[in-house]
């Protein structure tokens, strides 16, 4: 839903009866402004909710800050996640959310081989077939697009893959504690970039854009609440299986809510389905291997 709202604020459309005007152009700096507005809401909400969701959160934060390797891993994860989010917003604001989100979920093409190398695992036939399916899905989505227009989405997938790999190095830190540190890193980066071009950004601001950015923060807060609740109730791998369905859900939602995005070709819908099924299969394979070892 967050990506759909970003697409609506940039491209225009109708969102639950609210007419979104859209913009003539949407740049990296506009995307960064939206992310900054989102973090203005999200970080205070997380600070309030964190002790309710995970009581020893502040103790964990202190331990993470005292552990240099873990702190560097968390900071690195925050940097990569920042670029993944900003570039995803930029792609959603130019290509449309139905194209940008599925391309982000092609991140296993880089993340999985890197994790295999770090963990010393050997790829099996199933995971090899799944990786091929995700690659085919990405190619089908990209086929009607130019390399220049898809650049932000592909870079977002690369940054998100590096975020996943870096986060795997700080597994001892609880997801809520890690999230607070990483979002603070993202806020510092976003504020720094905002200060580099304050005039160029503020001249483009409208009331709808500002309210939309704050609305992103409210949606992100709800998303994190449901995500952390899912982690407690179902575990990380079952939650990951549900998250893997996001590309198809976003494409359908963007179409149903009449976002003024480019019309998807049939081969792009096929690519979205392949990436969705590939991500769900990878999560299911990890869950099966975990159940066999317990």
Image (spheres, rainbow, N blue to C red):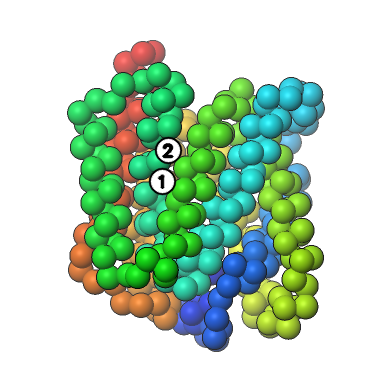
Residue at (64% x, 77% y) in the render: 209
To which quarter of the image does residue 116 belong? top left
User: Which of the pair 279/109 is nearer the observer?
Assistant: 109
Where residue 252 appears, as percent x and y from the top left, is 34, 66
Element carrying mark 2: helix
Element carrying mark 1: loop
Residue at (68% x, 24% y) in the render: 69
Residue 89 lies, with reference to residue 277, above or below; the image says below
Residue 218 lies, with reference to residue 123, above or below; the image says below
| 206 on left or right of 169 | right
Where residue 133 appears, as percent x and y from the top left, is 23, 46
To which quarter of the image does residue 71 belong? top right
Structural crowding at the residue carrying mark 1, measured as other residues with C-alpha within 10 Å and reported as few (<14), some (14–19) or many (≥20):
many
Where residue 91 appears, as percent x and y from the top left, is 48, 66
- Badges 1 and 2: C-beta atoms under 8 Å apart? yes
Mark on residue 107? 1
Q: Residue 208: in sight, yes or no?
A: yes
Residue 76 lies, with reference to residue 147, above or below; the image says above
Where residue 2 appears, as percent x and y from the top left, is 53, 62
Give the total number of marks visible in the rendering.
Answer: 2
Residue at (64% x, 27% y) in the render: 173
Residue that lies at the very extreme toward the top in this rendered image = 294
Structural crowding at the residue carrying mark 2, measured as other residues with C-alpha within 10 Å and reported as few (<14), some (14–19) or many (≥20):
many
Where does label 2 land, which residue? 111
Q: CA distance from mark 1 to mark 2?
A: 6 Å
User: Which of the pair 111/63 is nearer the observer?
Assistant: 111
């Amino acid at each position: 839903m967050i990506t759909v709202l970003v697409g609506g604020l940039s491209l225009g459309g109708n969102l639950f009866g609210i007419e979104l005007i859209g913009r003539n152009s949407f740049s990296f700096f506009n995307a960064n402004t939206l992310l900054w507005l989102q973090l203005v809401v999200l970080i205070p909400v997380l600070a309030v909710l964190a002790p309710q969701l995970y009581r020893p959160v502040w103790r964990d934060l202190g331990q993470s800050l005292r552990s240099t390797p873990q702190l560097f891993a968390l900071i690195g994860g925050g940097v990569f996640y920042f670029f993944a989010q900003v570039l995803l917003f930029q792609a959603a604001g130019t290509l449309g959310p139905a194209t940008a989100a599925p391309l982000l979920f092609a991140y296993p093409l880089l993340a999985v081989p890197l994790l295999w190398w770090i963990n010393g695992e050997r790829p099996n036939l199933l995971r090899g077939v799944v990786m091929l399916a995700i690659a085919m899905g990405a190619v089908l989505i990209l086929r009607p697009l130019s390399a220049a227009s898809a650049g932000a989405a592909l870079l977002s997938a690369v940054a998100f893959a590096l975020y996943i790999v870096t986060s795997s190095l700080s597994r001892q830190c609880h997801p809520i504690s890690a999230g607070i540190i990483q979002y603070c890193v993202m806020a510092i980066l976003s504020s720094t970039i905002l200060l580099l071009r304050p005039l160029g950004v503020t001249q483009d601001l409208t009331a709808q854009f500002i309210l939309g950015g704050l609305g992103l923060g409210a949606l992100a807060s709800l998303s994190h609440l449901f995500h952390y609740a899912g982690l407690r109730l179902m575990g990380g791998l079952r939650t990951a299986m549900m998250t893997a369905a996001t590309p198809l859900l976003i494409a359908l939602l963007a179409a149903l809510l009449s976002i003024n995005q480019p019309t998807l070709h049939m081969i792009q819908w096929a690519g979205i389905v392949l990436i969705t099924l590939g991500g769900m299969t990878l999560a299911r394979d990890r869950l099966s291997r975990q159940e066999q070892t317990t």
